[in-house]
Image: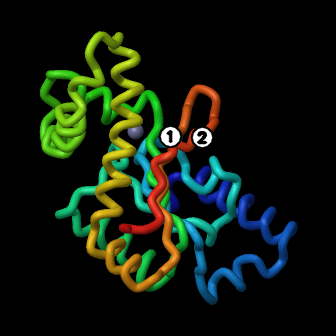
Amino acid sequence: MKTLKHLFDKNLAWATSINKENPGFFSSLAKQQAPKYLWIGCSDSRVPATQIVGLSPGEIFVHRNIANVVIHTDLNCLSVIQYAVDVLKVEHIIVCGHYDCGGITAALENHEHGLIDNWLRHIKDVYRFNAEKFNGLTHEKKLDLLCELNVTEQVKNISNTTIVQNAWKNGQELYVHGWIYNIKNGILKDLDTSFSSNK
Ligand SMILES: [Zn+2]
């Protein structure tokens, strides 16, 4: 018995409408993917990478985890970055955080959440590195600032990977950007933390 039938129905309707608008879309996409962008975002269901920038399947290579964190020992994330940079030759890596991020909120609290506390530790570190910037802020402002600083930190982490450093050394055109998304109005903001070379 097919479960979650409504999702299969929606899938068929979606594929049919794309085929009607753009016949051959799927067959040409099946031959290769050539995305220009790697998106590293939060797993939050309200921040779907391809949709919020109005692009189509095939245009963005995506990695998502809780609170869009890039850790130097995370083989999953590093493998995605390596494949995107070395094989797909993406030109832009975008770290996209978002306000009202549950991961960031949890990292600012002192409650226990189980296994995920180990993951959130990396965000607590971002707070610790920047502790003086939070002095005198309301809780809400602290949350917003930590969402932004977390993006900036991950942009630095990506730029410091051997993958990106070697790409730059080899003259590969590659930009790393830090963006933040407002789930209250659907608008993206560039945090102006872009890097394009290690010089
Ligand atoms: Zn989030």
- The reply to whether discs 2 and 1 touch (Cβ–Cβ < 8 Å) is yes
- Between 64 and 153, the residue placed more toward the observer is 153
- Between 108 and 159, the residue placed more toward the observer is 159
Q: Quadrant of residue 162?
A: bottom left
Residue 83 visible in rendering: no
- As displayed, is residue 58 above or below residue 127? below
Left or right relative to 180: residue 79 = left
Residue 150 visible in rendering: yes
Q: Position of residue 40 (x, y in %)?
A: 43, 56
Gap between marks 2 and 1 measured at Cα: 6 Å
Q: Position of residue 54 (x, y in %)?
A: 70, 53
Residue at 15% in and 38% down: 117
Q: Quadrant of residue 114?
A: top left
Query: In this view, which residue lies farthest toward the bottom?
Result: 31
Residue annotated with mark 1: 180
Q: Position of residue 12 (x, y in %)?
A: 70, 63
Residue at 28% in and 64% down: 160
Dot 2 surroundings within 10 Å: few (below 14), some, or many (20 or more)?
Answer: some
Label 1 SS: strand
Residue annotated with mark 2: 188
Residue at 66% in and 80% down: 29
- As displayed, is residue 153 above or below residue 99? below
Q: Quadrant of residue 119?
A: top left
Dot 1 surroundings within 10 Å: few (below 14), some, or many (20 or more)?
Answer: many
Residue at 60% in and 86% down: 32
- As displayed, is residue 186 above or below residue 10? above
Q: Position of residue 2 (x, y in %)?
A: 52, 61
Which sits earlier in the primary sequence, circle 2 or circle 1? 1
Left or right relative to 22: residue 40 = left
In the rendered structure, which amino acid carries the disc numbered 2? Leu
Ligand 1 picture quarter: top left
Specify how the rendered protein is coloured.
Answer: rainbow
